[in-house]
Image: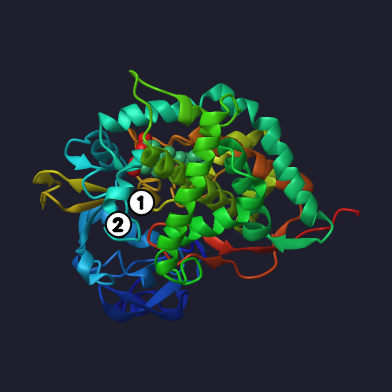
Amino acid sequence: MRERPAAVGGEDLKRRLGDQLAPVPDLRVGGLRRFHYICSMPDVSVVADLDLDRIDLGDLDLWDDGPPHEVFSRLRREAPVHWSPLAEYPHEGGFWSLTRAEDLHRVSLDWQTFSSFVGGIMVLDDFGIPLEGQQQMMISMDPPRHDRIKALFQRGFTPKRIAEHEERIRAIVNRVLDRVATRGECDLVTDVAGPVVSRVIGSFIGTPEAEDQRHVEETNLVLGFGDEDLRPTEEAVVEVMRRNWDETMELVAERRANPGMDDLLDVLVHSEIDGEGLSESEIFMGLGLLGAAGNDSTRSVFTSGMLGLLENRDQLALLLADPGLIEGAVEELLRMYPAFAHFRRTATRDVELHGKTIREGDKVLLWYVASNRDESVYEDPQRLDVTRRPDHQAFGAGGRHFCLGAALARLEIKLLVGETLRRFPDLELAGEPARARSLFLNQLKTMPVRFTPEAG
Ligand code: HEM
């Protein structure tokens, strides 16, 4: 189902490829319904002579089978700065897409021209959290305020603190795997990845385990705009924000009264730079950001990565035969299946790029799902290769906003993949996984698997 290159084409494509093509349901491109065909030959597909100007990357139908990698290849080659009207949300205006690794890098470094603050970092201005609220999160700030806040949060994410968590995380992973081990089947997203990553980030921040499942659902709700399972109602977002504000303020008051608790909240409440600490709203939105980033991202890469391995049994076999490959494999899974398809910037002035004029105020999307498969950087970029040990842009393309949780995420993915394969080496798919319907979340909602049960 996923990571199958989505070939988009018309009748001439059908004529040219004849029997190689298997028809699949039609697909909307640039607001038009067209037929599209997927080549039945492995790893070969063709995007027909589509008019690139008419492709709307904001059309969710284009994403049904995962990121439209064939379209991205053409954009990298022929239209490295591309405009999409975002017709699905007419009141939002369109966006520019950048897809080449080098361009993402340049733009990420140039925060003066490409701001995270001016319009936030989501494709939608209005995704349920007002811009002023978003701007209390470091991810939606520019320097110098960004750097001050990040430095405070970094005190909670030192390599030493992360390394100390290794055995704790391994224990969490195994405790969750214990729950499903004798069943011989489970859903890898909801039974394994969700409970593990929510407990890891919960214990790191200092929230009680009883709240974990609720935090998973809230993260889905806030980030899952566009998907009716993840965000069934719009009103719920406001309700969640209101309730969490009250709860966070209680926790903050508790930490102020009892300093010295060994968790991130304690660090955040008591840290200062030049005599200045974090405001209540900075703590609240900052924790929200960590909770959301922590709950969503690692879960996505682990489950998409496991699916990738199950679909590429030769790569799975390599990893099973040599667990020493795991650290390189984690990087390759991050490259192939970055948790977030893109983040946004907003142009602060008119700027020329590859012959196109990006106007002040325009939205610019940095597509990590595309830059991580840039042919000028990677040989055979669409192929999963656990021996590759790549550099990639899954954690950002350089610059100030490089992911704060990268070390924690790497450790979690390593332990999740490593322990799952150690205990369930014959894991296989037991049904069709379901993808989130989203331009932003590159993730699975469900992934049924089976394996030989462990003795009870
Ligand atoms: C596989 C897992 C993860 C991926 C793929 C990922 C990806 C990213 C990316 C691409 C950015 C850059 C955003 C931008 O340029 O605008 C980012 C920033 C950030 N991430 Fe992650 N992330 C992951 C895990 C985590 C975890 C586990 C945490 C926290 C515990 C976290 C916290 C953050 C924070 C706070 C920022 C903002 C940093 C800043 O603005 O300076 N991330 N992440």
Q: Residue furthest right?
A: 456
| Left or right of residue 66: residue 356 | left
Q: Is residue 28 above or below residue 268?
A: below
In the image, 408 versus 331, the foreground residue is 408
User: Where is mark 2, residue-wise?
Assistant: 123
Q: Is residue 435 visible?
A: yes
Q: Quadrant of the C terminus?
A: bottom right
In the image, 24 versus 185, the foreground residue is 185
Q: What's the residue type where badge 1 is placed?
A: His
Q: Residue at x 22, y 58 (%)?
A: 95
- Mark 2 crowd level (few <14, some 14–19, many ≥20, 10 Å Cα): many
- Mark 1 crowd level (few <14, some 14–19, many ≥20, 10 Å Cα): many
Q: Residue furthest top?
A: 274
Q: What's the residue type where badge 2 is placed?
A: Val
Between tags 1 and 2, which lies in front? 2
Q: Is residue 337 visible?
A: no
| Left or right of residue 388: residue 355 | left
Kindly state the secondary structure of the residue where label 2 is placed. loop
Rendering quadrant holding ligand 1: top left
Q: CA distance from mark 1 to mark 2?
A: 9 Å
Q: Residue at x 33, y 57 (%)?
A: 72
Kindly state the secondary structure of the residue where label 1 is placed. strand
| Left or right of residue 331: residue 324 | right
User: Where is mark 1, residue-wise?
Assistant: 342
Q: Is residue 356 above or below residue 439?
A: above
